[in-house]
């Protein structure tokens, strides 16, 4: 399956992605731990079947020091012992915020209570924004069949600076 459309060669798409990258920069510079940001992005991307974003966030997380064990267990985080309670709360929010159509309530009160327990308001703002942003990125890449495998750490940031 080849990409249907090259979003990186289109003037409108590049303008959009520059603004998209600016939004992601706000989250990246937030007090939400970088490791949590990558785990959340990876989990949402796995749920959405976005090869491009799985490739990107796996490689960015590894480059930032995440272990192979933790990266390999993200898809089964509930059955793993390598994630903190705070990371588990963030991963639950990522899953529930990604699978909105699967539950009438969206994010459960239990998950929200765990997020409130482990994160302050600025971190929660970043976390909620991140879940929305990664889901949008997943949809963009899946729609045009942007395939994973060619991403190099730092490539996204370098493209739009």
Image (cartoon, rainbow, N blue to C red):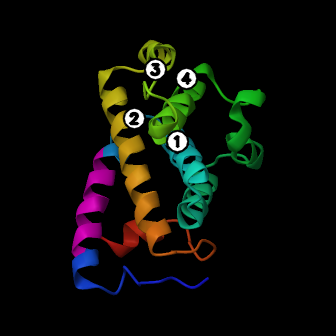
Upstream in sequence: badge 2 or badge 4: 4
Q: Is residue 86 above or below residue 20?
A: above
The answer to whether residue 14 is left or right of residue 64 is: left
Which residue carries the number 4 mark? 86
Please give the range of residues in magenta: 15-26
Q: Which residue is mark 2?
A: 127
CA neighbours of label 4 inside 10 A, class few (<14), some (14 to 19), many (20+): some
User: Would you say the residues marked 3 and 2 are in contact, meaning their CB atoms lie under 8 Å apart?
Assistant: yes
Residues at marks 2 and 4, CA–CA distance in whole angstroms = 12 Å
Quadrant in which the N terminus appears: bottom right
Which quarter of the figure has residue 50? bottom right
Vertical side of 52 occupied by 82: above or below: above
Image x and y of residue 3, in percent: 51, 82
Q: CA distance from mark 4 to mark 1?
A: 12 Å
Label 3: state its secondary structure: helix
Is residue 80 something that shows in the picture? no
Location of mark 1 (residue): 40
* Helix, strand or loop: magenta stretch: helix
Residues at marks 1 and 2, CA–CA distance in whole angstroms: 8 Å
- For disc 3, the marked residue is 115
Where residue 113 sits in the image (x, y, percent)? 45, 13
């Amino acid at each position: 399956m080849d990409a249907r459309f090259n979003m990186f060669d289109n003037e409108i798409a590049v303008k959009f992605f520059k603004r998209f990258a600016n939004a992601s920069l706000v989250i990246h510079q937030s007090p939400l731990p970088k490791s949590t940001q990558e785990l959340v992005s990876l989990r949402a991307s796995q749920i959405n079947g976005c090869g491009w974003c799985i490739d990107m966030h796996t490689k960015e997380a590894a480059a930032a020091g995440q272990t192979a064990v933790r990266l390999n267990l993200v898809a089964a985080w509930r059955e793993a012992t390598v994630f903190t309670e705070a990371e588990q709360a963030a991963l639950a929010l990522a899953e529930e915020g990604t699978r909105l159509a699967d539950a009438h309530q969206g994010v459960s009160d239990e998950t929200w209570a765990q997020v409130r327990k482990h994160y302050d308001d600025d971190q929660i703002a970043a976390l909620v924004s991140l879940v929305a942003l990664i889901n949008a990125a997943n949809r963009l890449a899946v729609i045009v069949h942007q395939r994973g495998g060619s991403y190099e750490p730092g490539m996204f940031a370098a493209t739009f600076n």
